[in-house]
């Protein structure tokens, strides 16, 4: 099958029997649900741009498995150029959607699982790599979205998986059969899970022998028997339920999505298993997936950052403040921070190297430095955007006020007239354009998109301390001490 279009992707979701719950109820038609649909639209852009000749080079690649043209989101990176193209593609999509477009977690899982299964098989003579290659060939041919799911709820952080009071705090094998395994547990805050055709599950931490049953990786369809999802709330999400209220939503077309994915004794046939007890490889899979996803943020957050900077510059213009030197300086600072993040994404890609399996991996130290900066700079970019935008971003009346014809003034002015009169900005700028850009900023900094741009910048792909541990492991302080000794003449 050729590459799907965005419209074909959306239709393909309708064929799934994915079980979705929101606000305590089952959502039957989740594809058209106003809270969910914007996140589906974002994923659809990953399809539409791949069919656009202008973006073909970035959005597609040649599969090493089939020799055919595939969407880059299903590709195994074959060079440092592929790694850099991945980051560029993510920046482009962030620019086009102003949100999380969700498909990267699968791409990062493909690359981590491909190389790790190769090394598990090498040590144990297992069949996991072949299983995975077969699975990915199907994904590439059918141009599917796969959710890469790693994060377990973890329960008591001071205890290992096997030592938890409730054994389900980490996904684990509850039964081993001739033809497969039965798994139980859940993965929390999973990006794009509802919008994915399949899921790849990976362990979330390095493990020891006692945790053998928790060292498990596999693929399963999103509508597998026993699997269901509970939708995550986002700030201001119910504005999307107000019919025709595109203004107050800020970005009515696109959004991100997270959910709790529950495995209530799900059967996984042998052919979809990529790890089942090889606990000594759990850490490798985690480290590689996290490394790829830390690289990813050097692309997607930068693209969304471009939209934040553009919106802040527009807000300044609509306020009539664009010539003030401090505004110009703040935009320079935002750009400097954003491009520093991009530099990290490109650098860890350019310094990548092949794995034993042949696909390319990023430089882990630089990818962790990239993500550590991501835990900080978007916050500063948002602070500056709010500084430039002014308080109206969070105090303006609703769209329905601007449109109200209820007479409230002594001279017959309506609520709409009053709002338009007092919220006007620079001469010749339509008042509603000023409101639109402020609502967009609200969405990006505090609203539904802030999940992806702010808090996910902190915790997605691992919280800041996880990167600091990797930086300390990879930083080679001993080697640096030797450099100092050599120059100082210390024997
Ligand atoms: Fe992709 Fe960024 Fe969303 Fe992760 S947060 S899935 S890298 S867009
Ligand atoms: Fe993420």
Image: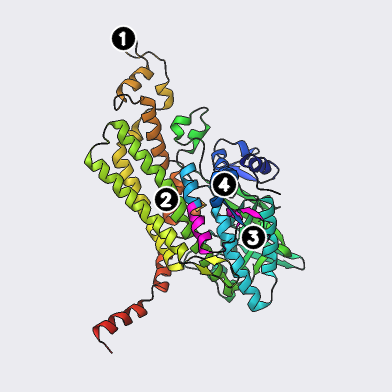
Q: Are dots 2 and 4 in contact, CB under 8 Å?
A: no
Among numbered discs 3 and 4, the one appearing first in the sequence: 4
Q: Which residues are magenta?
A: 63-88
Distance (Cα) linking label 4 and label 1 = 52 Å
Verify whether residue 87 appears in magenta. Answer: yes
Which mark identifies residue 92? none
Distance (Cα) linking label 2 and label 4 = 17 Å
Secondary element under disc 1, as helix, strand or loop, is loop
Residue that mark 1 sits on: 411
Q: Going 35% across and 14% down the picture, which residue do you hit?
A: 408
Q: Residue 48 occupies which quadrant of the picture?
A: top right
Q: Residue 24 occupies which quadrant of the picture?
A: top right
Is the residue 275 above or below the residue 338 in the image?
below
Which mark identifies residue 302? 2
Q: Quadrant of the C terminus?
A: bottom left
Q: Are dots 1 and 2 in contact, CB under 8 Å?
A: no
Q: Is residue 404 visible?
A: yes
Distance (Cα) linking label 3 and label 1 = 68 Å
Q: Nearer the viewer, residue 342 or 437?
A: 342
| Label 4 crowd bin: few (<14), some (14–19), many (20+), radius 10 Å | many
Question: Does the Cβ of the disc 1 residue fall within 8 Å of ligand 1?
Answer: no
Residue that mark 4 sits on: 46
| Numbered disc in front, either 2 or 3 | 2
Residue 243 in picture, x, y percent from top left: 53, 28
| Numbered disc in front, either 3 or 4 | 4
| Numbered disc in front, either 1 or 2 | 2
Distance (Cα) linking label 2 and label 3 = 37 Å
Secondary element under disc 3, as helix, strand or loop, is strand
């Amino acid at each position: 099958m050729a590459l799907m279009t965005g419209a074909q992707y959306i239709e393909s979701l309708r064929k799934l029997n994915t079980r979705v719950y929101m606000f305590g109820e089952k959502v039957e038609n989740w594809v058209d649900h106003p809270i969910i649909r914007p996140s589906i639209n974002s994923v659809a852009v990953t399809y539409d741009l791949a069919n656009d000749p202008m973006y073909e080079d970035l959005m597609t690649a040649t599969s090493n498995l089939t020799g055919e043209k595939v969407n880059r989101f299903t590709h195994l990176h074959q060079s440092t150029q592929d790694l850099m193209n991945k980051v560029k593609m993510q920046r482009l999509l962030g620019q086009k959607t102003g949100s999380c477009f969700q498909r990267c977690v699968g791409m990062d899982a493909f690359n981590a699982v491909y190389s790790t299964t190769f090394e598990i098989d090498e040590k144990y003579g297992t069949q996991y790599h072949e299983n995975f290659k077969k699975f990915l060939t199907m994904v590439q041919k059918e141009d599917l979205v796969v959710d890469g799911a790693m994060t377990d709820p973890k329960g008591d952080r001071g205890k290992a998986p096997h030592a938890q009071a409730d054994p389900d705090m980490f996904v684990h094998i509850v039964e081993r059969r001739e033809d497969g395994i039965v798994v139980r547990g859940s993965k929390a805050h999973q990006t794009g899970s509802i919008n994915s055709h399949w899921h790849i599950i990976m362990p979330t931490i390095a493990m020891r022998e006692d945790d053998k049953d928790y060292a498990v990786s596999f693929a399963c369809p999103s509508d597998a028997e026993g699997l269901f999802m509970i939708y995550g709330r986002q700030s201001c999400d119910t504005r999307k339920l107000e019919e025709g209220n595109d203004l107050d939503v800020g970005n009515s077309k696109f959004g991100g999505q997270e959910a709790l994915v529950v495995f209530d004794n799900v059967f996984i046939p042998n052919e979809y298993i990529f790890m089942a007890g090889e606990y000594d490889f759990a850490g490798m899979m985690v480290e590689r997936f996290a490394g790829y996803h830390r690289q990813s943020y050097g692309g997607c957050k930068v693209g969304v950052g471009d939209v934040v900077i553009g919106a802040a510059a527009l807000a300044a213009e609509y306020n009539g403040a664009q010539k003030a030197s401090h505004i110009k300086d703040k935009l320079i600072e935002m750009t400097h921070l954003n491009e520093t993040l991009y530099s990290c994404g490109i650098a860890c890609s350019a310094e990548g190297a092949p794995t034993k399996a042949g696909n390319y991996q990023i430089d882990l130290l630089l990818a962790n430095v990239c993500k550590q900066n991501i835990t900080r700079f978007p916050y500063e970019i948002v602070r500056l955007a709010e500084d430039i935008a002014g308080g109206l971003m969070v105090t303006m009346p609703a769209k329905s006020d601007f449109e109200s014809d209820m007479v409230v003034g002594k001279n017959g002015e309506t609520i709409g007239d009053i709002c338009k009169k007092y919220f006007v900005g620079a001469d010749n700028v339509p008042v509603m354009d000023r409101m639109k850009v402020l609502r967009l900023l609200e969405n990006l900094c505090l609203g539904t998109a802030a999940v992806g741009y702010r808090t996910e910048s902190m915790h997605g792909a691992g919280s800041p301390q996880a990167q600091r541990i990797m930086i300390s492991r990879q930083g080679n302080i001993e080697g640096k001490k030797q450099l100092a000794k050599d120059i100082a003449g210390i024997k």
